[in-house]
Each structure stands twice: as C-alpha cells, then as structure tokens.
Amino acid sequence: MFESLSDRFDSIFKRIGKRGTLTARDVDEVAGELRRALIGADVNAKVARAFVDRVKDRAIGAEIHKALNPSQQIIKIVNEELVGILGGETTKLTMSSKPPTIIMLAGLQGSGKTTHAGKLAKYLKSQGLHPLLVGADLQRLAAVEQLRTLAERVDVPFFSENSDPVTVARKGLEEAARLGRNIVIVDTAGRLQIDAELMSELREIRDVIKPHNTLLVIDAMIGQQAVDVAAQFNEQIGLDGVIITKIDGDARGGSALSVKEVVGKPILFAGTGEKLDEFEVFHPDRMASRILGMGDVLTLIEKAEATFDTAQQERAEEIMRDGTFTLEDFLSAFAQIKKMGPLQSVMGMLPGIPKELKNADIDDKEIGRVEAIIHSMTIEERRKPDLINGARRARIAKGSGTTTNDVNNLLKQFKQMQQMMGQMGVMGKMVQRKNKKNKKKGGGRVTAAASAPKTKPMGLPAGFPDMSDMADFDLGQLGELGGFGGPGSAGGPKFPRPNFPGPNFPGAPPKR
C-alpha cells in the first residue's frame, strides 16, 4: 500500500546521503519534498503539514547525533515521527473483567466489515479466547448468511434471527451467556454513505449491548475520505479504534497515516489480504519500518512461529547445528513460506531487499515450478544432488514440464544455500567448542547464574539455535572459515553470496 510513499522517501534519503553536512537550506529542501510525498500519498493536508514541521524543527535543533550522516539523521527523525502519527504504541482490545467482552463493528457498506468480523473471530480464537459471532446486519440480504458461513469456516458459534438489529444484538449476549463464550462480536449494518437512519440504529444497538470496544472498519482504498468517515462515526457513536482493510492493495496509504492524528483513535488491526488468516495486529513501529524500506522482521518471525510445527522446528535446529541441508529441506522450506502468505508480502518484510525485487510482479503459482522440479527427482537425488548428471537433468526437466536450464539454475541456487548452511554449521560448532573450553577453565564450581537455564533472545522462533553465548565468542576465529574478513581469510574458501530469485530462477515470473 505504501510503495509510492516508500519510493519517494527512498529517493529523498539517497540524495541527502551524498552530502557531508546537513545545512538549514538542506532541511528546508527535504521538508518540502517530504510534504509533497505525503500529500501525494493522500495524507490529510493538516497531518502532512504538522508532520513536516516537527521533522524540520528536530532536524535543525540541537538533538542531531554527531555520529550520524545527514541521511541517517533524517531517517531517524522521520521514523520516530511516523511511529507517532501511526499511533505510537501498539493498542490492544479492552477486555472486560466480567465476561463476555463485547465488540461492536461499524462501517460503510463494502468496507469488508462482515469478512473482518470472521477474521477477528479467527484471530481471537488463536489467542485462546472463545468468540461468538452475532449477525445484526439485517439490511444487506446476504450479510447474515455470509457471516454464518464464516463462522463455520473458523469453527465458532453464530447467532442471528429474523427480527430487528437491536433485538438480535441483545439476544446475542444471552446466547453467549448460555454457551459460555467470553467474546461477542456484533456485525452491524452499513450503508453506501452515512445517513441519520444508520447512525440512529447504531446508537440503539450501542445503548443496549454497551460494547467494550466499538471498532470502525475502514477501506484503505477510499483515501482521504476515510478520515471524514472516521470523524463522523466517532462523533455520532463514539469509537475505540479502527480496523483498516485492504492494505495489500494499491491504495496510497494516506488513510492509515491520518486517522490517528485527526480522529485520535488508534488502528488496532489491519487486513492484509482476502484469506481469513491474512489479518494482523497493527504495530505502528513495524509499519513505519516497512514504509521506510527497513522491513518488518518481528512480524515475519511471528508468522514463522505460527506456521512451523515442532518437527520442522527441530529439523531447522538440526540444520543450523550440523550444517546439513538437502533438497527435501529446500522443498519443505518453500511449503512453509507459502503458508506464511503471498511471497511478495513476505519479501516486503525482509530488510535490505532491493526495491526492484520488492516491487517485482511475483506470481506465487510460478513457485510451483520449483516444487515440480524437486518432486520430479528421486529421493536419492534430493538427498544427494551431486548424482544429478546431464541425463538425469533432462529426465527431471521432462517430468516437471520445465527446461534443463531451469533445473541447472535451481541446482546452482541450492548449492549456494547448502554452502551457506555448511558455513553456519561450522560457526555453531566453533561456538560450542569455545563454550566447552570456558567451562573446563571455570572448574567444578557452578554459580547460581551459571546454572540458570538460558533463554533464547526474545523474538526468535522455536527451533533456532541458542546464540546467547555469541557475546563471548571471538569473532577473529571466523577467519578460520575464510571469506569473513578475519585473520587467515585470504586463503580460505569464499563464503557464497546468496542470489535473490532473478529472471532466470525457476519460479520467477516469465519475461514479458
């Protein structure tokens, strides 16, 4: 959603990065470009002006860190101010001390309100809660049936009846008490535009069920109009937060950057696609990082944690420890990455990915070609790729419906990854050997601190090796591996530079 804004920011930062110092004139120039970039992204004019003024004041103030170059100074300030206008800290739902917690969803027709009621139920269920979906949208003919179908898909109970919205909402609470559900999500009616009848109905429902969270569902595609819609709903019924939908689309992103600043209500969740699991908590700091092209590693880790099962995590740990990596592991990794969502979305969360690759039109179906090639190999060939000679490559290409050039490229990419895994395995063993030496030097006495179980760094998913001892590791020893720049690296083998899937990678979109 923020591609155009990210590109504008990127060009600004690159240009000022070439300058040795940041003068007042430079700051004025950057401020003007930032303002144009924000307005071009559909950010509310008042929000854009206030944002740029704050950046400008800080850039010419005394807080500039002397160790940072001009580009880094501006990026640091812009990042902090972006986090601020996106909401500052991550906001959570208000949970009732006496169940059930009642959530009322409101919004215009076509915003994705009913679909996101199902997504929210699925998310809350994954958090160990027990939601009930209540269909109080009796205005749209298919709304009740749509919500009933969604409830079946996410395996949560559903309630509605053919009476009136207020009665349905009230009886929904009674049904939740009867079933022992601790979350009630009430889907209300929408209109193509705000009118007195809609607001009156929403106020009646609100007064009867007294929701702990009144959330507005906003379509990111409607641009600056989203701010006006949010302001009117907040004035008429009072909002506690916002769910922004379709952030995976080609909207310019101004609504997300404007809602909190203008309306004063935080964005709690974001819809990232059409599937029920393409829904995530909105983290202002992570979104700011994405906008500035710095990736979103924490969200990527959370997706990996939710996707990988215990056996796969144990295998990942074994690969990292022993440096073993086969084409079967390569195939398994592809399958898990596909579960994490669209490949382009996943790549957008990786820091340091070239802009051309992030913006490339990657068709997930093309990844099936890679899987087809590996599936066309025998088990022995997958475990020992060196066996694959010219005749076998021709057979694999024929069996997978690809070319021998595709097979060659895949094997080349795999070889590079295998070498990289091998180097990581050697590094892990060196850390283990150093730890054993340190324990021997320490004698038999074990202190309470030493005997305490070590924990993995917060944020790393299960299955990653314990790297807590790396702080004591002498990085100079990495020279033994070669190619790392340490002593002795000149004569050692070179660490392969992994290539991102390029135009010749079997799985890249076809050339146009």
Image (cartoon, rainbow, N blue to C red):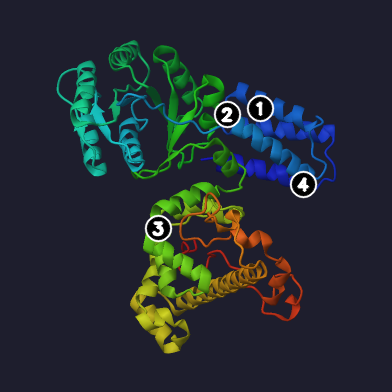
Left or right: 276, with 42 as reference point: left
Asked if labels 3 and 1 touch by Cβ distance under 8 angstroms, the answer is: no
Residue type, mark 3 in image: Phe
277 relative to 508 in the view: left or right:
left
Mark before the other along the chain sequence, 1 or 3: 1
Marks 2/4: CA–CA distance? 25 Å
Calculate the distance from the C-alpha at mark 1 to the C-alpha at mark 2: 10 Å
Give me the C-alpha separation between circle 3 and circle 2.
38 Å
Q: Can residue 333 be seen in this view?
A: no
Query: Would you call the spot at circle 3 few (<14 residues within 10 Å), some (14-19), or many (20 or more)?
Result: many
> What kind of residue is marked 4?
Gly
Indicate which disc residue 51 carries. Answer: 1
**Frontmost residue, 444 versus 48:** 444
* Relative height, residue 218 to residue 308 (above, below): above
Decide which of tag 1 and tag 2 comes sooner along the chain.
Answer: 2
- Residue matched to label 3: 308
Label 3 or label 4, whichever lies nearer to me, is: 3
- Work out how far the residue at label 1 is from the one at label 3, CA to CA, in angstroms: 40 Å
Residue named by callout 4: 17
Dot 4: within a 10 Å radius of its alpha carbon, few (fewer than 14), some, or many (20 or more) residues? some
Q: Position of residue 220 (x, y in %)?
A: 46, 33
Q: In which quarter of the image is residue 371?
A: bottom left
Q: Are circles 1 and 2 on residues that touch, CB within 8 Å? A: yes
Which of discs 2 and 4 lies nearer the camera? The answer is: 4
Q: Do the residues labelled 3 and 4 touch (CB within 8 Å)?
A: no
Judge from the rendering whether residue 394 lies leftward or rightward of residue 464; answer left or right: left
Kindly identify the residue that appears in the image at 39 percent across and 44 percent down.
Answer: 278
Q: Residue 43 carries which label?
A: 2
Mark 1 or 3: the one toward you: 3
Mark 2 or mark 4, which has the lower sequence index?
Answer: 4
Classify mark 4: helix, strand or loop. Answer: helix
